Image (cartoon, grey):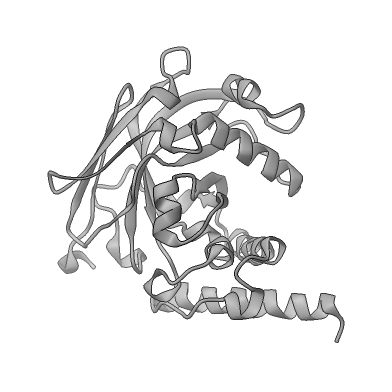
Amino acid sequence: MTQATRHNDAVTKAAERLQSAARSGVPCRPVRDLIGGSDVALAYAVQQRLTEARLADGARAVGRKIGLTSPVVQKQLGVDRPDFGVLFDDMDVSALDLVPADRLLQPKVEAEIAFILGADLADGPLDADQVRGAVEVAVAALEIVDSRIAGWDITFGDTVADNASSGLFVLGEQRLGLAAFEPVAASMRMYLDDELVSEGSGAACLGDPLLALAWLARTARDLGEPLRAGEVVLSGALGPMVPVPAGARVRAEISGLGPVTATFSGKEER
């Protein structure tokens, strides 16, 4: 068996394990026994395989999420670099009265800045100045992260393969261009049932959310899937992520962008 065949077999088995967990609602064991804990190429190959399956099933890609941008979150998960995943149309639950808890296995929530792009990011240096010019508006967001892997027992390879531990997301109502909003200067407070559970700032996100966006733009282009106008990009957490139980209400306030809220369905709504 050639190395390419072994790698393809590992990617297939890892994707099948994660798909089975998503379909059954029962978290699985990590996939690092198949693809390793730090093999970037294999991890993204699994993610791409899962993305292709979702698209074949009729889902529509609407953007990307940047993960592991906060040193605090990196420490929580035991990893040391950012990653990214794909956002699909059915992950946006902004218009729902209740976040459907039955779609989630072991959810956690974090407050972020979402950027909606007004221009492609496919050519040029893709530095902070260029990505600033490509942002149409910024909006407060809640990312509901989730893991198909039992107990969040993840390495970098595990989370990348699992679409960067993506779940759902909620966008706030107020939208501002960057002439009126400076991401790095934003402060964030997040409340769970009115208890302050997380706080941070734009500077916690790779030093500046626009630097995180520039990192994603370059990485996505290198992988052959550059960012396009109209896409939503979740910047990465501005503070620690927090487990969220069924029936809870989460509210985050990001200075300049206002609040974003989400109420999760309770056990009786599952």
Q: Residue at x 65, y 35 (%)?
A: 228
Name above or below for residue 174 compared with residue 99.
above
Where is residue 4 drawn, in percent x and y?
83, 75
Name above or below for residue 45 compared with residue 199.
below
Name above or below for residue 155 compared with residue 118.
below
Q: Residue at x 44, y 45 (%)?
A: 70
Pick the quarter of the image with the N terminus: bottom right
Quarter assignment of residue 127: top right
In the image as oriented, which residue stretches furthest toward the bottom?
A: 1
Left or right of 166 on screen, residue 172: left
Where is residue 12 drawn, in percent x and y?
67, 77
Quarter assignment of residue 44: bottom right
Camera-side residue: 116 or 157?
A: 157
Pick the quarter of the image with the C terminus: bottom left
Left or right of 46 on screen, residue 188: left
Camera-side residue: 187 or 246?
A: 187
Name above or below for residue 10 compared with residue 246.
below
Q: How many marks?
A: 0
Left or right of 263 on screen, residue 202: right
Q: Residue at x 57, y 61 (%)?
A: 160
Where is residue 122 drawn, in percent x and y?
73, 33
In the image as oriented, which residue stretches furthest toward the right?
A: 2
In the image as oriented, which residue stretches furthest toward the top?
A: 179
Q: Residue at x 70, y 67 (%)?
A: 42
